Amino acid sequence: MKEKKRCPWCLGSELYMEYHDNEWGIPVHDDRLLFEMLILEGAQAGLSWSTVLNKRAHYKKVYNNFDAKKIAKYTEKKKAALLQDAGIIRNKLKVNASITNAQLFLSIQKEFGSFDKYIWQFVNGKPIVNKFKTMKQVPVSTKESDAMSKDLKKRGFKFIGTTICYAYMQAVGMVNDHLVSCWKY
């Protein structure tokens, strides 16, 4: 049986390939999953995605399945427990940002009716489908991720620079950066 041709970045592990095949680049319109990916992409800052992906199941457990309403109310005691938990990335700034971002996420939901409606406006409601042949062609940011980052920062979000925003856009299918040779393209 012939092996499926995949984007080269995912070839390191089964978990990576599963994520590539079943999530990355597929449009997400579910607010809970959009929030989950926002928190995980922020946690990744300065680290590899595989580090975060390997900790994702534990994040779901200790972060109340990424329930923004619960996270927005985390106490100092809960923060302290998270910072002692080796199953997540124990960075005080990132843990604090996840709580702040949960509060701001809820205010965007209130303002726009859903986070989905807000976030997808940066690509006019439909995925940008690129036609890259090599990984070198894939950008780390775009004018859309610049605009998203600028607006989120203006609202008070943390760990949301343009590179993080572009990775987020890829993760939630706002852009399709599967190489044209990939079976998912």
Image (cartoon, rainbow, N blue to C red):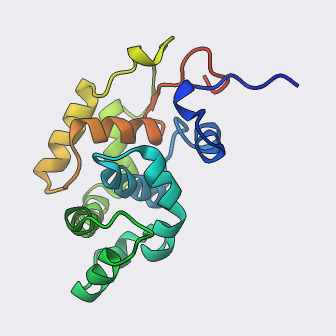
The quadrant the C terminus occupies is top right
Asked whether, in this view, residue 62 is left or right of residue 90, the answer is right
The residue at 14%/49% (across/down) is: 153
Q: Is residue 74 visible?
A: no
The residue at 57%/15% (across/down) is: 180
The image shows residue 118 at horizontal and vertical percentages of: 31, 47
Asked whether, in this view, residue 58 is left or right of residue 83, the answer is right
The residue at 33%/45% (across/down) is: 119
Quadrant of residue 73 within the rendered picture = bottom left
Report the label total.
0
- The residue nearer to you, when weighing 55 against 119, is 55
The image shows residue 88 at horizontal and vertical percentages of: 40, 66
Residue 183, relative to residue 17: is it above or below?
Answer: above
The quadrant the N terminus occupies is top right
The image shows residue 89 at horizontal and vertical percentages of: 35, 63
Q: Is residue 139 visible?
A: yes
- The residue nearer to you, when weighing 35 against 13, is 13
Asked whether, in this view, residue 16 is left or right of residue 170, the answer is right
Direction left: furthest residue? 154
The image shows residue 54 at horizontal and vertical percentages of: 52, 56
Direction right: furthest residue? 1
Quadrant of residue 184 within the rendered picture = top right
Residue 83, relative to residue 41: is it above or below?
Answer: below
The residue at 27%/36% (across/down) is: 163
Residue 85, relative to residue 123: is it above or below?
Answer: below
